[in-house]
Amino acid sequence: MLEILSLIRQDGDPRWCRSVPNWDRGPWLETLLGYRRARGNARPRIISSHLPVQMFPKAFFGSKAKV
């Protein structure tokens, strides 16, 4: 899924996918390092998570984020 979203974000150009590691393109929200990386990434951000949707903050559901 991360590869597909990365390609969509770059209009199908695979150079970004080949040059930037997965953990920088879609950092894990569950880790402090991943959270910091995600906040520093340009918008629109790609964020990875295995958290159940019930554990997401309530503000998430009122945002424009896509799941």
Image (cartoon, rainbow, N blue to C red):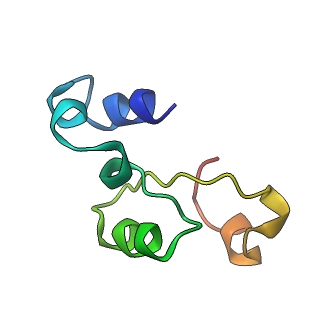
Where residue 33 sits in the image (x, y, percent)? 41, 72
Vertical side of 63 occupied by 14: above or below: above
Whole-percent x, y for residue 15 in the image:
14, 29
Percent position of residue 49, x then y: 61, 54
The quadrant holding residue 38 is bottom left
Q: Residue furthest right?
A: 54
- When the figure is inspected, residue 66 is found, relative to residue 30, above or below; the finding is above
Q: Position of residue 60 (x, y in %)?
A: 67, 69
Closer to us: 32 or 67: 32
Marks counted in the figure total 0
Q: Is residue 46 above or below residue 58?
A: above
* Residue ID at (30%, 63%): 41
- In the shown orientation, is residue 19 left or right of residue 5? left
Name the residue: 27% across, 44% down. Answer: 21
Is 59 left or right of 5, judged from the image as shown? right
State which quadrant residue 16 falls in. Answer: top left
Is 40 displayed left or right of 59 in the figure? left
* Displayed quadrant of residue 62: bottom right
Q: Residue at x 31, y 54 (%)?
A: 24
